[in-house]
Image: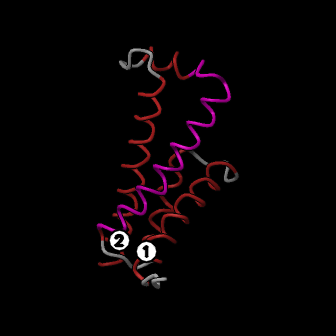
């Protein structure tokens, strides 16, 4: 079995911390929805990675978290709310498109927050 390099370990830990802390501040922090940006910046400052890896770890952490939460909530209410919201937006009533857009938004904001933290660390 191969040993995991420290770079891979940092990447995995950064993804897990992004998702865990993003979930925690959203659920327990009584803070606005975008408060995970601060946690991603802090994680990227504390865990030294290349900017591209920092972006990907933050993006994957938050993107996967938002996908999972949207998917679970959507299945629990049998797609009723997501279909109505998708009809309001130009998504032709597709709950799959709405979950995809949600995932992409989380992916981009999480990645950009981590990239910002990485650049702050470098400066």
Residue 3 position (above or below residue 61): below
Q: Main secondary structure of the magenta part?
A: helix
Q: What residue is disc 2 on?
A: 118
Q: Residues within 10 Å of mark 2 (few under 14, many from 20)?
A: many
Identify the secondary structure beneath mark 1: helix
Q: In the image shown, does 85 or 96 lie closer to the viewer?
A: 96
Q: Which residue is mark 1?
A: 45
Residue 72, image x and y in percent? 62, 37
Q: Residue at the spot x=35%, y=62% of the render?
A: 55
Q: In the picture, which quadrant includes the C terminus?
A: bottom left
Quick check: 25 above or below 10? above
Question: Magenta stretch?
Answer: 52-81
- Between discs 2 and 1, the one toward the N terminus: 1
Quadrant assignment, res 103:
top left
Do callouts 2 and 1 mark residues in contact (Cβ within 8 Å)?
yes
User: Which residue lies at the image location 47% right of the left edge and 56% below the top edge?
Assistant: 37
Residue 12 appears at what percent x and percent y? 48, 70
- The image quadrant of residue 119 is bottom left
Q: CA distance from mark 2 to mark 1?
A: 6 Å
On screen, 30 above or below 6? above
The kind of secondary structure element at disc 2 is helix
Seen at 70% across and 52% down, the residue is 28
């Amino acid at each position: 079995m191969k040993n995991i390099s420290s770079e891979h370990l940092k990447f995995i830990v950064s993804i897990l911390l992004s998702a865990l802390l993003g979930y925690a501040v959203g659920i327990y922090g009584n803070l606005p929805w975008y408060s995970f940006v601060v946690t991603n910046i802090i994680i990227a400052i504390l865990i030294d990675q290349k900017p591209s890896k920092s972006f990907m770890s933050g993006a994957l952490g938050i993107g996967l978290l938002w996908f999972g939460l949207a998917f679970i909530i959507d299945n629990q209410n049998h797609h009723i709310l997501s279909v109505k919201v998708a009809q309001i937006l130009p998504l032709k009533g597709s709950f799959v498109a709405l979950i995809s857009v949600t995932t992409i938004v989380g992916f981009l904001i999480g990645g950009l927050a981590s990239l910002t933290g990485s650049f702050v660390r470098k400066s």
